[in-house]
Amino acid sequence: MITDYAIETDAIQKIYRSRLRGREIKAVSNLTLRVPRAVKFGLLGANGAGKTTFVKMLLSAVIPSSGSARLFGRDARMPEARRPVGYLPENHRFPTYLTGFGMLDFYGALSGVDSRTRRRRIPELLDRVGLQEWGDVRLKKYSKGMLQRLGLAQALLHNPVLLILDEPTDGVDPVGRRDIRDILNSLTGTGVTIFINSHLLSEVETFCDYVAILKKGELALEGKMANLLAGRGYRILVSGVPERVLDELRGIGAGIARSETGFEVQALTLEEANAIIDRVRAADGLVESMSATTSSLEEVFIRTTSDTPEHVAA
């Protein structure tokens, strides 16, 4: 089946049942998601939001309670659907008695890569992830960051067309994170789809084209990164505003913070910004400036996952 999507899920759900208390826990609830081919896609959510459970259902490591998942149009439960997938789990456990070369050779054989290709690819990948001098060293001497780099090499070994990476830069220093990002960026234009599950919002904002945010197992927000971060509001700098007017502005949900000369008021829409300006001028206050603002991914994430709207108090 030809499809424009690398990953498709339809109302996929995972329910865990507690035998002791007789209650149900919905780890993932009726999640429908489409990940286009050849994009960089980030999956976000607070701890316990269902991100890892969702990834495991894509790989059939966890069986859905209901719904379905497809990889490149094929049922994800079929082994042939998962052959073009490279996977780096969050808490991987490589045999520490193996060397870096030996581990890649072993996992490459499990992936069906022939011995001639393994002998050629492994030195290339060790060099690519900055471990060219560590190929003959046993893994028990590797740092966590080095093991993450080696795990990425393992995921790339069989030339996958879909990379699923669960916290790929966990435990990696800033230089290492940049190197891993550069390696993944080098795949741009090759047709590889990169699907990242991460809690490092700044990394996802810098790297990904698309993002989806989970909240308590449900899909709370999804879309192109550029669209989600653009045109999110207005910043108005005011001074000479009586406290009663500030209270009125808080009452309509405006975010207010102190500035060097007075107060900074945040409005979400142009209409709200004009209403704030009218109130300030009616109270003989001074509007010093107004500028359009964009949100960081962190701000979008907090706004999406918070149970109640949050505003900055004076």
Image: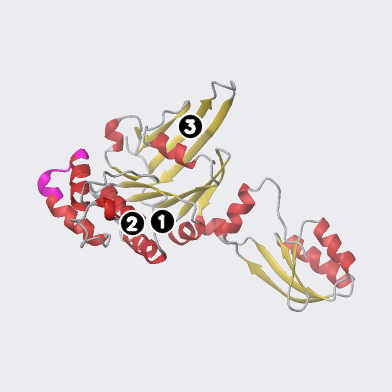
Q: Secondary structure at mark 2?
A: loop
Q: As rendered, which of 296 and 210 lies closer to the eye? A: 296
Q: Measuring 11% from the left and 45% from the top, which residue is drawn there?
A: 115
Colour scheme in use:
secondary structure
How crowded pointer 3 is (Cα within 10 Å; few <14, some 14-19, many 20+) is rated as many
Left or right: 271, with 114 as reference point: right
Query: Is residue 37 visible to us here?
Result: yes
Distance Cα–Cα, label 2 vs label 3: 37 Å
Q: Earlier in the sequence, mark 2 or mark 3?
A: 3
Q: Residue at x 18, y 53 (%)?
A: 122
Q: Quadrant of residue 296?
A: bottom right
Residue labelled with disc 1: 171
Q: Is residue 40 magenta?
A: no
Residue 6 lies, in percent from the top left, at 37, 43
In which quadrant of the rendered image does the C terminus lie?
Answer: bottom right
Which one is in front in this view, the residue at disc 1 or the one at disc 3?
A: 1
- Residue at x-position 15% and y-position 49%: 118
Q: Is residue 177 above or below residue 162?
A: below
Q: Secondary structure at mark 1?
A: loop
Residue that badge 3 annotates: 12
Residues in magenta, as a range: 110-118
Above or below 175: residue 66: above
Return the mark for residue 143: 2
| Marks 1 and 2, how far apart at CA | 9 Å
Residue 220 percent across, percent down from the top left: 58, 44
Q: CA distance from mark 1 to mark 3?
A: 31 Å
Q: Quadrant of the N terminus?
A: top left
Evaluate if marks 1 and 2 touch, with contact meaning CB atoms under 8 Å apart.
Answer: yes
